[in-house]
Amino acid sequence: MTNIEQALGSVRARIAASESRYGRPPGSVRLLAVSKTKPPSDVAEAYRLGQRDFGENHLQDAKAKLDALADLDITWHFIGPVQSNKTRAIAAGFAWVHSVDRLKIALRLNDQRPADLPPLEVCIQVNISGEASKSGVDPDHLAGLAQEIRSLPRVRLRGLMAIPSPSGDFEAQRAPFRRLRTLLDGLNGDGFRLDTLSMGMTDDLEAAIAEGATMVRVGTAVFGARS
Ligand SMILES: *Cc1c(COP(=O)(O)O)cnc(C)c1O
């Protein structure tokens, strides 16, 4: 068994155990394998083991990988900060963008999504308190941004994403995930039909699943530490 085979197996087991423990239907949490900084051969290995969703956070780092693996039936997710001058390549190369946090970026992705591809699936990144990065829309501005994005034909708003700052305490990990779920529920109460909560990484995926994550973004636990 390779390292990736073993690691992927144990991440899948962690997800299944949390689904069961927190009353989530089996298979309701999708694993997004975060392959940033890792070589195409690692992605190909995970693919061989049945993994189909992969996440990248730097266009520059991702480009060669997407090209090298173009023959594989991979769903690529962009999860990093989106710069305006990168939207064209992101709109063409990725199926999902989890990190939309301002209208300007959504408009560019909408305009630049190639006509021969289905609409780009997007999540709004929210800056819930204690965010590790500066990215993400302020919760007070979420509803307005969601309304604007909803009207765009070439992007499809699927849900919300957040990256809370790390915490070793399980209950403390759960709190920001609960806030994100509450924000999603609020939008759905206002007539949205959002089905995606992109939250949880290597060190807090159990807490995220307990709070309703539908997609966990896991790098280190699948591919090992990044240098
Ligand atoms: C790197 C990264 C991850 C994965 O982090 P790990 O702790 O290695 O699992 C998840 N989400 C985003 C946005 C990332 O940049």
Image (cartoon, rainbow, N blue to C red):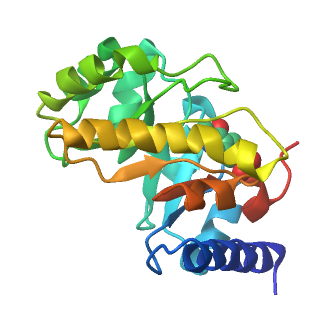
Q: Is residue 93 visible?
A: no
181 with respect to 122 (left or right): right
Query: Where residue 60 sits: x, y (%)?
Result: 59, 30
Side (left or right) of 188 relative to 56: left
Residue 44 picture location, percent across and down: 61, 68
Above-or-below relation of 70 to 101 = below
The quadrant in which the N terminus is found is bottom right
Classify the position of the C terminus by image quarter. top right
Q: What is the x, y in percent for residue 195? A: 31, 53
Ligand 1, image quadrant it occupies: top right
The quarter of the displayed image where residue 91 is located: top left
- Nearest to the observer: residue 45 or residue 193: 193
| Of 215 and 95, the residue lying toward us | 215
Give above or below for 208 relative to 185. Answer: below
Residue 210 versus residue 173 in the image, above or below: below
Q: Quadrant of residue 20?
A: bottom right
Residue at horizontal 54%, vertical 79%?
Answer: 50
What residue is rendered at 74% in x and 55% in y?
Answer: 202
Q: How far across and how far down the image is residue 58, in percent? A: 60, 32
Q: Residue at x 83, y 46 (%)?
A: 226
Q: Residue at x 55, y 74 (%)?
A: 19
Q: Is residue 115 visible?
A: yes
